[in-house]
Image: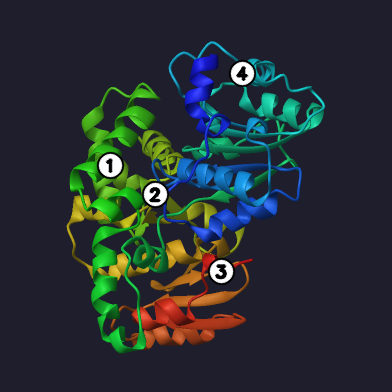
Amino acid sequence: MEQLFFRFNPWWEEEISYNFVKRETYLLQMEQSMKRKDIAILTGLRRIGKTTLMKLFIEGLIKNHDIEPKRIFYISLDTYGLEHYSIMDIIDEYRKIHKLPFAEKIYLFLDEIAYKENFQQELKNLYDLSNVKIYASSSASSILKDKKAHLTGREKIIEILPLTFKEYLLFKEIKMSKANNHLLDRYFDDYMQTGGIPEYVLTGDIAYLVELLDDIIYKDIIAAHGIRDKTTIRDYFRLLMERAGKQVSLNKVSRLLGIGVDTARRYLGYFEDTYLIHPIERCGKLNERLKSPKKIYAGDIGIKNIYTGFRDKGALFENLVYLKIKHMNPCYVYKNKIEIDFLTKDKTLIEVKYNSELTDKQNKLFESVNADKKILIKNVKDFTVILPSYSDQP
């Protein structure tokens, strides 16, 4: 394993400098986690930038915190040849290479942690028994379903979302000034068409996005769960992209696709587990939440556009608003067949009307809902100035 470890950790032999665009919001969260013992777990879509963030953070540890390079270990656990080794075996081998005593603190970066079957137990053991700071990543939300509660109280989840509009401009090297503010709408149109997958934003290569989607659907869903009916899975996902921003009834889905309701529910869970979709519940009492259909949003609007084409900007705009407020745990309001888009956990009511106005019935419901704050999002200025953003959080 020694040669493999050196390939993954070039800073052991030479000075490193990564020419990646920095996503400061997430790097700050990783920095803040350094002050605590908790296990920082980065989650999100495949190729959303988790590995890049790890490498940028490693560079910062060496240059800004004077951490000895040999005390920093990065490994991708989905690498061929490591499948027969436990995490503990791999860490022990790393310590042997550098003659690091068990008591000496090390910094571990464990990419694609979910490839190890008993990773929760192993992370717990490392946390409890070793002098370590652990950063781990996974492209599956199943990492959050710790049935035996091994990591309860020991983890800090950092969900990596697609690029925000501000990050999109940074990646495209577009600097907005007051003199060029008239171009904001045009750039935002481009953003709505492209979405926020970093590599696709940089290259514009649609084949890359198609390949990414195929990888997720075929490797992480069809192959991982032994699904034989590949056509139904793709048809189901296309249906969800067409319905993004709307309520999705599992009964209707099952009838349209010719599958059972339980199968429709299970497949929906697979899409959610890979971050291709995000469902939200109806606001209200427990029975209302359980009985009502969920609204579905695309994990990335660039992926949605592969299926639907660049149309229905209102739906795309609403999807972007959702991604921007996802950290606020929103639900949707529904009463007498009238809907208000979002009510957040901190009682902020948000309605999205892209370049349009509330109907009389919507306005009455909007005014009647008990909320501490009410926001109407109608255009790019509202989106960038008024709307709360995850990137604004400490």
Judge the density around disc 1: few (<14), some (14-19), many (≥20) Cα neighbours within 10 Å. Answer: some
Of marks 4 and 2, the one in the foreground: 4
User: Of callouts 3 and 4, which one flags the residue occurring earlier in the amino acid sequence?
Assistant: 4
Residue underneath mark 1: 236
Which three-letter amino acid code belongs to the residue tagged 1? Answer: Tyr
Check the image and report above or below for 101 versus 151: above
Q: Quadrant of the C terminus?
A: bottom right
Figure check: 304 above or below 138? below
Disc 4 versus disc 1: nearer the observer: 4
Q: In this view, does 141 lie to the left or right of 62?
A: left
The answer to whether residue 227 of the structure is visible from this angle is yes
Which of the 4 image quadrants contains residue 255? top left
Q: Nearer the viewer, mark 3 or mark 4?
A: 4
The amino acid type found where label 2 is placed reads Ile
Could you give the CA–CA distance between mark 3 and mark 2, rounded to whole angstroms?
A: 19 Å
**Residue at image coords 74%, 40%:** 154
Q: Mark 2 points at which residue?
A: 277
* Callout 1: SS: helix
Residue positioned 51% across, 42% down in the render? 55
Circles 3 and 1: CB atoms closer than 8 Å = no
Position of 97 with respect to 199 (left or right) is right
**Which comes sooner in the sequence, label 3 or label 2?**
2
Name the residue tied to disc 4: 90
Q: Which residue is drawn at 34% across and 23% down?
A: 223
In whole angstroms, how far apart are the C-alphas of marks 2 and 1?
Answer: 12 Å
